[in-house]
Image (cartoon, helix red, strand yellow):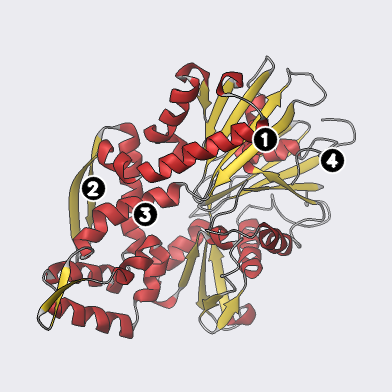
Amino acid sequence: MTSGAPARALGLDFGTTNSVAAIARDGQSDLVDFVGAQATGAVFRSALCFWPEDGAPGGLAREAGPWAIAEYLDFPQGCRFIQSFKSVAASPVFEHATIFDRRLRFEQLGTSFLERMIAHAGGKLDSGPTGRPERIIVGRPVEFAGSRPDEALARKRYDAMFAEFGSEIHYVYEPLGAAFSFASRLTEPATVLVADFGGGTSDFSIVRMAPPGAGRRCEPLGAAGIGIAGDRFDYRIVDHLVLPMLGKGSQYRSFDKLLEIPRSHFADFADWSRLALMRNRRTLEELARLKRAAVDPDAIGRMIAVIEHELGYALYDAVGQLKRALSEAPHAHFHFASDDLAIEADVTRADFERWIAPDIARIEATVDRALTSAAVTPEGIDRVFLTGGSSLIPAIRAIFERRFGAARIASGGELTSIAHGLALIGQEADLTGWTV
């Protein structure tokens, strides 16, 4: 531990899909494993579930992480489920989420999430006078998700969300956390490009790493990011593979004309948790009328079944399984079935890569921006470290193999490296150059 650094620091990777915490002491970082029947090790799903309950604060009981998913699946009609809420942190359009008869702002959602995360950590994240870490390092994307992200608004919301979490809060770009973690592997000085592919954003940082024993192991040189990542890839599969089976692109009869089914009916399929909001009398009556006029009424019937029987979570889970399978094999079988619906399809990796090609092109352009911001050419990059779940997608890896060669690429700790590195950064005596 560097002289003057805190005895204990917490690194929190608050992610769009998953969140991970790590605690550093004496220069060593350990993940925080969650405890209980629903626990999934150190990975805590970034999700919330609310339901009415007498005696609960404000009349609303709440759960987070895998416990939120379990509550929702047990009683979907009586719950309000929210996931990926980090993606609206920088959105001026988002003012609040309507939870039954209450309106909750982003920071209120975030505070509820942190409260339940702490509760499931078995005392490791308790905020008592002896349990609270002296310093908390929170990861943040290089560029927030959204078409026109307002960074100042996101910072204001983050400040409010974490106000009660700790007395000394610092923000660090997420890929810099991964870089600090990766530094522990290196024995020679190197200029490293770190690429972090999360659920909502893809972020890139370039750092110069000194050899072990140097007073400052890492020096940030430049960074860039884009709001395209795993969630977008999931939706590409839904859009190209699933929605045509639910009527997208087909037609309906209106008097003597054949018209395309309005694409607005499929907008909420971009996020499976939003499908629950479509389960209302007005929407279902509109779809029933559309089914009677449709050229392919069975397709509209399948869409109604997804909405009526709360199949969004299971549908996106099947999509995720397909995406992971296509990272390991050149073709895979998509299978989604319930008592009321079955969708089967054979999918090739080439199909998937064609669907995400526009996204890959924008990600590659963002890598160029990161290099430019650091005033470094591809030849000046000694090592590339890929992290985040989507870094396992072959089309993503190919971006870096083409530019830097396979020999310079390393990966690992796809879900945990950022939290590890953030905690270690927290033990640095001087955070100048790290914090945003």
Q: Nearer the viewer, residue 92 or 291?
A: 92
Which residue position is annotated with label 4? 6
Three-letter code for the amino acid on which mark 1 is drawn: Gly
**Which mark's residue is nearer the viewer, 3 or 1?**
1
The local secondary structure at tag 4 comes to loop
- The location of residue 314, given as percent across then percent down, is 32, 58
Q: Nearer the viewer, residue 153 or 271?
A: 153
Q: Is residue 399 left or right of residue 387?
A: left
Residue at 84% over, 30% down: 2
Which residue position is annotated with label 2? 334
Residues at marks 2 and 3, CA–CA distance in whole angstroms: 14 Å
Residue 82 vertical position relative to residue 394 in the rendered view, above or below: below
- The location of residue 365, given as percent across then percent down, is 50, 38
Question: Mark 3, residues whose alpha carbon is within 10 Å: few (<14), some, or many (≥20)?
Answer: many
The local secondary structure at tag 2 comes to strand
Of mark 4 and mark 1, the one earlier in the sequence is: 4
Of mark 4 and mark 3, the one earlier in the sequence is: 4
Residue 378 vertical position relative to residue 393 in the rendered view, above or below: above
Three-letter code for the amino acid on which mark 4 is drawn: Pro
**Which mark's residue is nearer the viewer, 4 or 1?**
1
Residues at marks 4 and 3, CA–CA distance in whole angstroms: 43 Å
Question: Mark 2, residues whose alpha carbon is within 10 Å: few (<14), some, or many (≥20)?
Answer: some
Of mark 2 and mark 3, the one earlier in the sequence is: 3
**Residue 133, numbered label:** none
Residues under numbered marks 2 and 1 in contact, where contact means CB atoms less than 8 Å apart: no
Question: Residue furthest toward the top?
Answer: 188
Which residue position is annotated with label 1? 222
Three-letter code for the amino acid on which mark 2 is drawn: Phe
Residues under numbered marks 3 and 1 in contact, where contact means CB atoms less than 8 Å apart: no
**Residue 235, numbered label:** 3
